[in-house]
Amino acid sequence: MRGRNGSWLAIAALTAALVLGADAQAQTTPAANAALTSDNAIMVTIFFKHDQSRPLGELNAQLERQGFYKAFPPEGVEVVSWYVMMGVGQVVTLRLPASRLREVNRVVENNAWGAYHTEFYPTYDYKAVGLAKHDQTK
């Protein structure tokens, strides 16, 4: 239960930062040229879950028709990782300015839905901390 509460707290903090830290214009119009800086960078992990009721060839044809790979990821959004999770689909972690979160969401809604069911998770890089803790136990 603690992990789930932590996720909700992270989502609430991200939402507050977007609402309180940006003017109304930035909330409705993504800043296409926003620079990625340490004070505005966010990471988000997206699960693209395959619609397993349909064959893969059909899903890929739909993604092609909808222009998924042309539109995703949007230009200037950093792909941190992009994996296939067997039995699930694709898992993509992006790093982007907070002001572009809506843009990423819209690209997914317009170009991935139908072939994929999607889930979004606020994410942060824990690798160095986790490995350091592991090394400390040796």
Image: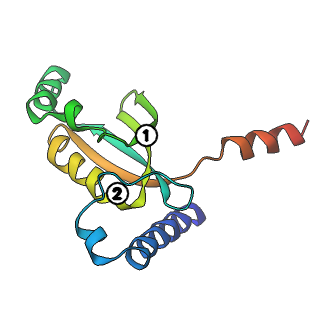
Q: Which residue is mark 1?
A: 78
Q: Quadrant of the N terminus?
A: bottom right
Image position of 5 with respect to 90: above or below:
below
Mark positioned earlier in the residue sequence (1 or 2) = 1
Q: Can residue 52 be seen here?
A: no
For label 2, the crowd category at 10 Å Cα-Cα, with few meaning under 14, some 14 to 19 and many 20 or more, is: some
Q: Can residue 63 be seen here?
A: yes
Asked which quadrant contains residue 86, the reply is top left
Q: Which structural element holds mark 2?
A: helix
Q: Quadrant of the C terminus?
A: top right
Query: What residue sits 29% from the left and 52% below the top?
Result: 32
Side of 75 where 40 appears, left or right: right
Query: What residue sits 36% from the left and 33% below the top?
Result: 90
The location of residue 71, given as percent across then percent down, is 21, 38
Of all residues, the one furthest to the right in this rendering is: 138
Query: What residue sits 34% from the left and 56% below the top?
Result: 100
Q: Are marks 1 and 2 in contact (CB under 8 Å)?
A: no
Side of 108 where 92 appears, left or right: right
Q: Which residue is mark 2?
A: 101
Query: What residue sits 67% from the left and 41% below the top?
Result: 127
Q: Which structural element holds mark 1?
A: strand
Side of 13 where 87 appears, left or right: left
